Amino acid sequence: MRSTAFNQRLLRGQTPSYERLQARLAEDHTSQPSQPQAIHCGWGRLLIGHTYPDATALAESLLGEQPGERDIALYVAAPHQVLAHAPQQLFLDPSDTLRLWFTDYRPARRSFRGFRIRRAQNDTDWQAINCLYQTRGMLPIDPTKLTPYNEGGPTYWLAEDEDSGAVIGSVMGLNHQRAFRDPENGSSLWCLAVDPQCSRPGVGEVLVRHLIEHGMSRGLSYLDLSVLHDNKQAKKLYAKLGFRELQTFSLKRKNGINQPLFLGPGPQAELNPYARIIVDEALRRGIEVQVDDAEAGLFTLSHGGRRIRCRESLCDLTSAVSMTLCQDKRLTHRALSRAGLSVPAQRLTGSAEDNATFLAEHGSVVVKPVDGEQGQGVAVDLRTPGEVQEAIDRARVFDQRVLLESYHEGHDLRVLVIGYEVVAAAIRRPAEIIGDGRHSIGKLIDAQSRRRQAATGGESRIPKDAETLRTLHGAGLDYDSVLPAGERLAVRKTANLHTGGTLEDVTAILHPALRDAAIKAARALEIPVVGLDLLVPAADQPEYVFIEANERAGLANHEPQPTAERFVDLLFPLSLAPS
């Protein structure tokens, strides 16, 4: 690591040749390692730039990157000299490097509760971290490749929910003193990720603070990190903690993983997450992509003379008739009923007397527009004629035709079928907040909405509408109420992701009867890609009631299941998935 004096020379723009830089480093730090230092982090190597004897050696090491990995050369004082050796294969990372000197650090003024920080210890931990990383579009870790801790390797920490035991965040820390005898006693942070469905506030901040305070307890002097130049949300957190920009550079190799960094965002960057996940998979396979209308999620894929138009996961392979069968919930109900599948009782709304009779027959009902999506206009578990009429009035904003259905208790299960095979299944849970004993329910909903919007590209939030207020009133609360610390509260009855719901992947435990019913439903609708909604007592039990079918299912909601891969397989069966 460069000394403070050397860093000051770099800040003044004094950048001599690579060889002179190495000589200066040797003069400043006679204790620097005699061998080039490369630390394997499980997803690739960190190449410590100034430990390499010359630009050629560093370039050759970067070119030795293994398939499926991502190497990073950091603290490169003269990147142009390294790039000159392989300009077609290497590129300058557009990320910014930030540093916090521990003398500038100020401890948190408030405590965050509900989760604990500990080291990753076993295969279960690694599996949970990898699931989290894949959900955030990051490379998974192969723990067998990690540089051993006693040889200067990294440490992975995780945030574990105290109630559920679920891993809700992770971060990697590297002690530079142990890794490459850094004379400035530094450290660095990598791979910070928080579960986008996490309802606990402050997880990311606590993970960063944990690394800072852990480093301070070990007598270290600073913490460095790398952040994309346009990641405003992360930079806001780091600025709050006292990080400042460091004038240094990082290099990477051009590969499929890094493609957006060296080619630029491209038109697909304007697509929503549900379209972008498909486009990214297509580009990885060499399939031509034409973005037709980014705002609407419309794009065209072309490969080997085959051309298919898509709107997110709705494509030319879905017929207009099949699409109609899904959009009109009356037709969905009849098609599934004729196929012998279990469905709720259903009827169009009529007079107040007819509606009251249906309610009296079933005790509790659901109101929904005939043609609606994303949970709009849906109200569930209505028990009085007044509630039913108010819900009907709200539903008519989306469609004048409104349905009544018998209400059934159970978990909301989404099953994704592609090519008449079940690819993913998840239990959807309604939006939930956790009290802290200080902030009102309204403020907690606003904070949770901001986190959900940031994690989903603006696709998910908790609306403070009549349905949310009805749910609160049902619990004897309102927006101004304050929940005790640690108390959980569902603020919606429906579990739609667009209204702040969350997902729990249950693909591995899905009962065979549910799997068969989903495939049978897809065939009854004759639709090749569909998201089917069921109410079930549990994902590993056979009982179910079908609620509806979605012709434009959100593939991005089911990561890390291979939804985009199976979708592109269906569209272009001769295309090869990247290794």
Image: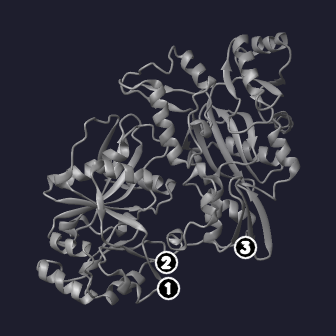
Q: Can residue 540 be seen here? A: no
Mark closer to the chain start, 2 or 3: 2
Residue 528 in picture, x, y percent from top left? 78, 54
Q: Which residue is mark 2?
A: 254
Horizontally, is 178 left or right of 400 in the view? Answer: left
Which amino acid type is shown beneath numbered disc 1? Gln
Q: Are marks 2 and 3 in contact (CB under 8 Å)?
A: no
Q: Which residue is mark 3?
A: 574
Q: Nearer the viewer, residue 373 or 248?
A: 248
Q: Nearer the viewer, residue 361 or 182?
A: 182
Q: Is residue 489 above or below residue 65?
A: above
Q: Secondary structure at mark 1?
A: loop
Mark closer to the chain start, 3 or 1: 1
Residue 65 in picture, x, y percent from top left? 42, 79
Q: Quadrant of residue 191?
A: bottom left
Q: Are marks 2 and 1 in contact (CB under 8 Å)?
A: yes
Residue at left 86%, top 53%? 319
Q: Quadrant of the N terminus?
A: bottom left
Horizontally, is 572 left or right of 267 in the view? Answer: right
**Gap between marks 2 and 3 measured at Cα:** 26 Å
Q: Quadrant of residue 126?
A: bottom left
**Gap between marks 3 and 1 measured at Cα:** 29 Å
Q: Which residue is mark 1?
A: 88
Q: Are marks 3 and 1 in contact (CB under 8 Å)?
A: no
